[in-house]
Image: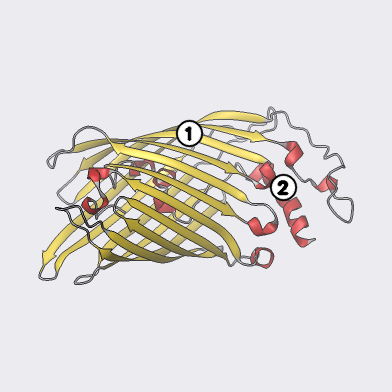
Amino acid sequence: MKRILLLLVLAAGLSEIAAAQDIHFSNTEYVPLVLNPALAGANSGRQAALAYRTQWGQLGSSFRTAVASFDTRLGKERANKVNNLAFGVNFFTDRTPGKLITNTSAAVALADHIKLSSTSRISLALNVGYAFASYSVGNGRWASQYNGAAYDGSISSGETFGNQSFASLDAGAGMLYTFEKTSRNSFGTSKKKIQTGFAAYHVNRPNDSFIQYNDSRLPIRYTFFLNADFDITGTKSSFQPGVYVQRQGTAAQYLFGTNYRYQVNSGSKYTGYERPLSLSMGLFTRVRDCFIGRLMVEFDQYSIGYAHDFTISLLSTSNGRLGASEFFLRYNMGDGGGFRNKGVR
């Protein structure tokens, strides 16, 4: 009964809150164009990524989000080149429990990476997209369909809406700073990389309402992040800490933690017979929401990762502390192989 009542409350409010807050991921840096459009071409010459997230399935039905992205640098790259243009495309679909609301979006990003010195660069980007949302009243469970003892689907919901679907143009922008340096010493090479970025999505405030003649503007989503990749001198290990902040309207999200990465095999650059292999594990937290365990395997050009959210909010009493599961797969085509892109995150 507790779960049924909770789903009724969620469903009753979805028309107001589902579209008002954007999608989010626990492996947020591996869905780069959702985080910042300036990440297009920033860390790889060319890459493709897929991500899938399912959340709150323990309540009987789950939120499901899928993202596909591709980004590439444009033109020939040269060591003394000051500007590198890059292009990215990002698709996502987000579905609420019971297929009540489905949001689909396609966006393109154009970034310019400007070299400041041998170790640093700044990146600027524009993002333009087209979003489509649809609503299925018949798939909802409404408070009016509660007969006093349980949900009864034969009772009319009494709900009417002016629009069953709508579409809108969307615009955003982002900027990024990257510092990257490789040092050589008696223990070998040691890499240090730091990135920080700020972005704004929905800057044109598109209308976002299923109710006819209702002017409900989507709040601007602001993102900020700071992450790093530090080799531990004399070892095959590195730490990758990160802080990720998102704010949209009155909602705010703070995610931070670190990955530990171990290079099992560095691979052979010359023969190509040995491919690089590394393993990563991480612990993050989304403040007042969950702890996140993360695992990742990188083999040559391929990366596959998993994250699980362990709920610590009041919702933990209903979902058994199991908040969300998330997978991602990345194919790094930059420079022809993962071992030639050790600096790529």
Residue 125 appears anywhere in the view: yes
Identify the residue at image location x=79%, y=37%: 159
Crowding near the residue tagged with mark 1, few <14, some 14–19, many ≥20 C-alpha atoms within 10 Å: some
- Name the amino acid, label 1: Ala
Q: Could you say which quadrant of the image residue 98 lies in?
A: top right
Residue 209 appears anywhere in the view: no
**Residue carrying label 2:** 11
Crowding near the residue tagged with mark 2, few <14, some 14–19, many ≥20 C-alpha atoms within 10 Å: many
Horizontal placement of 185 versus 146: left or right? left
Horizontal placement of 337 versus 7: left or right? left
Q: CA distance from mark 2 to mark 1?
A: 26 Å
**Residue carrying label 1:** 106
Q: How is the image coloured?
A: secondary structure
Towards the viewer: 265 or 340: 265
- Name the amino acid, label 2: Ala
Q: Position of residue 183 (x, y in %)?
A: 14, 62
Label of residue 258 in the image? none
Towards the viewer: 35 or 213: 35
Q: Position of residue 157 (x, y in %)?
A: 82, 40
Q: Could you say which quadrant of the image residue 304 lies in?
A: bottom left
Identify the residue at image location x=76%, y=38%: 138
Quadrant of the snapshot with the N terminus: bottom right
